[in-house]
């Protein structure tokens, strides 16, 4: 494997970014955006929404860490009361899961990229696509209003019986989740139909970019699993309003039934979060190694396998709930099995870099960070899948660190890598690569400094969600808080780097990285209908006819 910062080739014809009308300037004014059917504009509106949600959830995370700077046993140094602390971590978890992580890649980047990577002008149902966005807006507004109004303190999982007895606005919050679920279902349905029916001539299943494979597998989960969450939150609302005795033990209900329903959706939802991230990494590893993807079919099949296995392992969240021994053994075995397709992807990504010409630019550094962080998240999941070990680690900070390594170290880092990778195509502007590299380095160090100490805290018995702790845990908590501040600074640098490019960035060439997928063959930024002429479908990972043009700083495909 060789590492270069800029490939050197013979001079080539100039292929600059298009100057004709593009989707950003096609029409102007508020209504032209509010009523648009252009998938690219809808993707950008989703992107603005999820980034605002992420900023809010991130601020709450920093408040949690600042509160935990001191043990707070005597309450004199505590930033918040226990009640307010419960509301803050509930709000943080709910915003990050329902408003950021789940929609960030499928709804934002997926909406923008899927039709262009397919070589078509839009999704199958443009009006349904716009409707999905407004459902997301309504659900987010409903959800956030209920959380800010009087404070919700149930945790983002809404576990019964506490969610039945809580005085917080549980019904309003669950209705917000219900509406958000419809947005997710409609988006998934739209993507499935688009990929099934609108692929151009020559684009067989095994000529699709791997990002589309990941998006397709994610859409299957969205359509099949999300209705279970909708039914569950409706039953919870009915339990609170009507007292019908489904989950309330006082009325002969079973609170563990709620956990089964909730996790039957929420564990597949983990793959709604991580599968699109894996699709992004497949694209980044190939393009920035300037080498065809290693094991294309195995990566494609593993995406489908992860989607299917994801429906079978929800019980590993409930090993301490009193299930039968045989049931827990089966769930434990299935949990270990689901790690196989994920490991296939990791080994194939590493194989892709082998003997490639790796460009250590901002997107690639985020991709490398993803492999490191996601691997730690996956390996620590094996400990939680082991029955005897899980009894000790369940509901400790070990679990907090594990799912943050998977969700943030996986989904968030891949999202940032994909955002930097496709930012020139989306905006027509190049960002400062040095600033992007600095952001990736700070995020990587800050993330590990935040969550590695939490693994140690968990093994020593520190329970999660507690507003206070014994003094022996103070040093590790403070180390974690320092890491969170550094992580926040890195994310701020990343955001400022992208915003700076909008005003001061150089004009982006059509193909700044040397990609071979179809989105790099259209104008930058893309025109309203994506392609002025139908693109030629080929191998999405064949780089043999891609050459560098030193005049524009971009690449072009030889005819």
Image: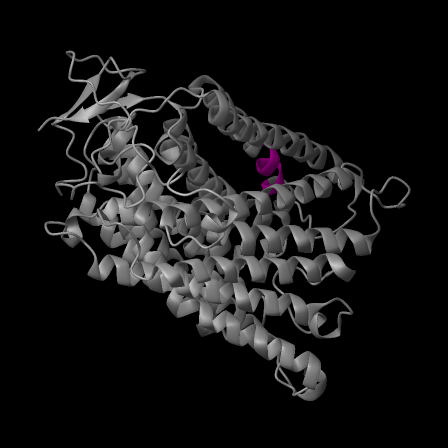
Residue 312, quarter of picture: bottom left
| Position of 358 relative to 162 (above/below) | above
Look at the image and tell me in which quarter the C terminus lies.
top left
Q: Is residue 451 magenta?
A: yes
The residue range painted magenta reads 449-455
Q: x, y percentage for residue 182?
A: 47, 67
Q: Which residue lies at the image location 16% right of the left edge and 47% below the top edge?
A: 207
364 or 112: nearer the viewer: 112
Q: x, y percentage for residue 442?
A: 54, 25
Q: Does the rendering let one see residue 312?
A: no
Give left or right: position of 519 versus 326. Answer: left
Residue 366, quarter of picture: top left
Q: Which residue lies at the image location 29% right of the left edge and 38% below the top edge?
A: 283
Q: x, y percentage for residue 314?
A: 46, 65
Q: Main secondary structure of the magenta part?
A: helix
Q: Is residue 234 magenta?
A: no
Give left or right: position of 193 versus 401. Answer: left
Q: Does the rendering let one see residue 298?
A: yes
Q: x, y percentage for residue 48?
A: 52, 44
């Amino acid at each position: 494997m060789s590492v270069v910062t800029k490939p050197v080739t013979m001079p080539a014809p100039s292929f600059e970014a298009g100057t004709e009308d593009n989707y950003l300037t096609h029409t102007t004014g508020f209504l032209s955006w509010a009523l648009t059917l252009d998938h690219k504009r809808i993707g950008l509106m989703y992107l603005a929404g999820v980034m605002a949600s992420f900023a809010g959830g991130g601020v709450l995370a920093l408040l949690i860490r600042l509160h935990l700077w001191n043990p707070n046993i005597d309450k004199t140094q505590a930033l918040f009361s226990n009640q307010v602390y419960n509301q803050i971590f509930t709000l943080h978890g709910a915003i990050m899961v329902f408003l950021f992580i789940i929609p960030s890649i499928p709804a934002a980047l997926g909406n923008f990229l899927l039709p262009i990577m397919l070589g078509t002008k839009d999704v199958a149902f443009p009006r349904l696509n716009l409707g999905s966005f407004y459902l997301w807006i309504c659900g987010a507004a409903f959800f956030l209003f209920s959380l800010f109004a009087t404070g919700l303190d149930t945790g983002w999982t809404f576990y019964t019986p506490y969610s039945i007895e809580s005085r917080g606005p549980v019904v309003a919050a669950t209705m917000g989740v219900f509406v958000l679920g419809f947005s997710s279902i409609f988006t998934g349905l739209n993507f499935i139909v688009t990929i099934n029916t609108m692929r151009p001539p020559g684009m067989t299943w095994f000529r699709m970019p791997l990002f589309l494979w990941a998006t397709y597998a994610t859409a299957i989960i969205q359509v099949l699993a999300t209705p279970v969450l909708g039914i569950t939150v409706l039953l919870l609302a009915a339990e609170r309003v009507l007292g019908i005795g489904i989950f309330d033990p006082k009325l002969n209900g079973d609170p563990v039934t709620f956990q089964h329903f909730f996790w039957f959706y929420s564990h597949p939802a983990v793959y709604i979060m991580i599968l699109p991230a894996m699709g992004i990494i497949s694209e980044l590893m190939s393009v920035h190694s300037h080498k065809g993807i290693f094991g294309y079919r195995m990566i494609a099949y593993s995406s489908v396998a992860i989607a299917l296995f994801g429906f079978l392992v929800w019980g590993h969240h409930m090993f301490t709930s009193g299930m039968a021994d045989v049931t827990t053994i089966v769930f434990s075995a299935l949990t270990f099995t689901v790690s196989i397709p994920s490991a296939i992807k990791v080994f194939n990504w590493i194989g892709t870099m082998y003997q490639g010409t790796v460009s250590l630019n901002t997107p690639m550094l985020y991709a490398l960070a993803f492999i490191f962080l996601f691997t730690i998240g996956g390996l620590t999941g094996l400990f939680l899948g082991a029955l005897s070990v899980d009894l000790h680690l369940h509901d400790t900070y070990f679990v907090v660190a594990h799912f943050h390594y998977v969700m943030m170290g996986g989904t968030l880092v891949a999202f940032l890598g994909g955002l930097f990778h496709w930012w020139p195509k989306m905006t027509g502007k190049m960002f400062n690569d040095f600033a992007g590299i600095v952001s990736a380095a700070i995020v990587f160090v800050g993330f590990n400094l935040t969550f590695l100490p939490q693994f140690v805290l968990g093994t020593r018995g520190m329970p999660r969600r507690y507003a206070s702790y014994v003094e022996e845990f103070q040093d590790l908590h403070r180390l974690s808080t320092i890491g969170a501040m550094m992580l926040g600074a890195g994310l701020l640098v990343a955001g400022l780097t992208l915003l700076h490019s909008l005003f001061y960035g150089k004009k982006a060439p059509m193909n700044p990285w040397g990609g071979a997928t179809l989105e790099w063959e259209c104008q930058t930024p893309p025109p309203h209908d994506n392609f002025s002429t139908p693109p030629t479908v080929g191998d999405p990972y064949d780089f043999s006819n891609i050459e560098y043009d030193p005049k524009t700083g971009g690449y072009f495909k030889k005819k």
